[in-house]
Amino acid sequence: MNTSLKQSQADILSRLYDMKRKQVEHALQQGNSLRCQVLQAEAEAISNALKSVR
């Protein structure tokens, strides 16, 4: 995979991860534990994908 494509994917995944963490924070404030668990799992999957691209 070329460097510019990897960087583009990393940028997108990084933004997705940031948005997902904000969703987790919002769910925590609402006290919705099930939603928090789902969002945290999604955030972890995005983080793992980001690590594999870098």
Image (cartoon, helix red, strand yellow):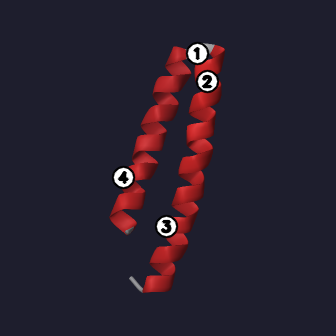
User: Which residue is denoted by mark 3 in the rendering?
Assistant: 10
Disc 2 element? helix
Q: What residue did someone put label 2 on? A: 27
For mark 4, give the secondary structure: helix
Q: Give the residue type that dot 4 points to.
A: Asn
Q: Quadrant of the C terminus?
A: bottom left
Q: Does label 4 or label 1 sit earlier along the sequence?
A: 1
Residue 53 vertical placement versus 26 (above, below) = below
Which residue is rendered at x = 60% and y = 13% of the image?
A: 31
What's the residue type where badge 2 is placed?
Ala
Disc 1 residue type? Asn
| Residue at screen point 44% across, 84% down | 3
Q: Quadrant of residue 8?
A: bottom right
The reply to whether the C-beta atoms of the residues labelled 2 and 1 are less than 8 Å apart is yes
Q: Residue 52 appears at what percent x and percent y?
A: 34, 63
Q: Residue at x 39, y 67 (%)?
A: 53
- Cα gap from disc 3 to disc 4, whole angstroms: 11 Å
Q: Which mark is residue 48?
A: 4
- Label 1, on which residue? 32
- Secondary structure type for disc 3: helix
**Which sits earlier in the primary sequence, circle 3 or circle 1?**
3
Pointer 4: residues within 10 angstroms few (<14), some, or many (20+)?
few
Give the residue drawn at x 57%, y 63%.
Answer: 12
